[in-house]
Each structure stands twice: as structure tokens, then as C-alpha cells.
Amino acid sequence: QVQLVESGGGVVQPGGSLRLSCAATGIGFSINSWAWYRQAPGKERELVAGMPSGGRANYADSVKDRFTISKDNVKNTMYLQMNSLKPEDTAVYYCNAHLWRWSTEYYSTWGQGTQVTVAS
């Protein structure tokens, strides 16, 4: 079983920064694509940033030029650097990965979520 473990959430003032991490743990797997989603109270889960296999990173319009998605293939870890945070960025952030396991299983898995609160 492959698990995604998130960290880095917290409370920050408007204009501040946070860096989220998502580490994949397990054996026999390779990540095909990564993504960050978020869900605010009363709203649907939305895509924040994605990093497809071999492709360019893509971002929701609301976070372009403020958020940066990156990955460390050696550590099997994905990051989300969030700058110039706004109150409307407050949400639970979830990481998602599409992966191969033992070269035969292909599936999507989610992290447990980490709370980001932007408030003065």
C-alpha cells in the first residue's frame, strides 16, 4: 500500500508564505503524476496545481504567480510553495498522486489533508 503523508499546513497572516510537503511511502511504486487540491468549507474540492508526467505544471487561475508546485523524484516528495497568501486560500489542502505499483497496478491515491488558514 502506498501512502501520501502531508505536512506544512498552519495559520499565517495575509501576505505570508507556507510550504506544503507530500511524501509518498511504500514499496514497488513509481509516481506518474502529482497534484494539489483544496477544499474550503461549503465548497467543492478544486484543483490548485498539477504536475503531469513529462508535462508542464499547471495552476488554477486564482493561484497563478503565487503558488509553485515542485517535486523531488529521489525523495518521492511533492511540494507546494505558497506565497502572497490571501484569506480566500483558507482550505484543507490535499495531495494526490497517480502511480504504478509493481508495474501492474495503476491508481490514484490521496493524502489525509492539511489545514491552511490565512487570517490576520
Image (cartoon, rainbow, N blue to C red):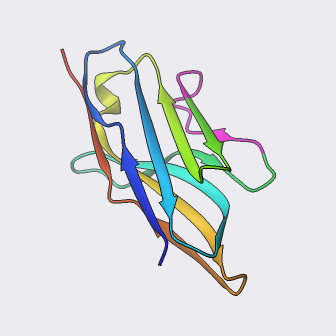
**What residue lies at 55% left-to-right and 49% top-to-bottom?**
77
**What residue lies at 38% left-to-right and 50% top-to-bottom?**
6
Place residue 53 in its image quadrant: bottom right
105 versus 23 height, above or below: below
Magenta part of the protein: which range? 56-67
73 versus 96 height, above or below: above
Place of residue 73 in the rendered image (x, y in percent of width and height, measured from the top left): 68, 50
107 versus 23 height, above or below: below
For the C terminus, the image quarter is top left
Query: Depth check: 32 or 62 in front?
Result: 32
Q: Residue furthest left?
A: 120
Q: Which secondary structure type mostly characterizes the magenta part of the structure? A: loop
4 lies left or right of 30: left
Query: Depth check: 15 or 46 in front?
Result: 15
Is residue 65 found inside the magenta-colored segment of the image? yes
Q: Residue furthest bottom?
A: 104
Place residue 99 in its image quadrant: bottom right
**What residue lies at 29% left-to-right and 50% top-to-bottom?**
43
The total number of labels drawn is 0
Place of residue 50 in the rendered image (x, y in percent of width and height, measured from the top left): 61, 48
Is residue 21 found inside the magenta-colored segment of the image? no
67 versus 120 height, above or below: below
Q: Residue furthest right?
A: 54
28 lies left or right of 96: right
Place residue 57 in its image quadrant: top right
Place of residue 21 in the rendered image (x, y in percent of width and height, measured from the top left): 45, 42
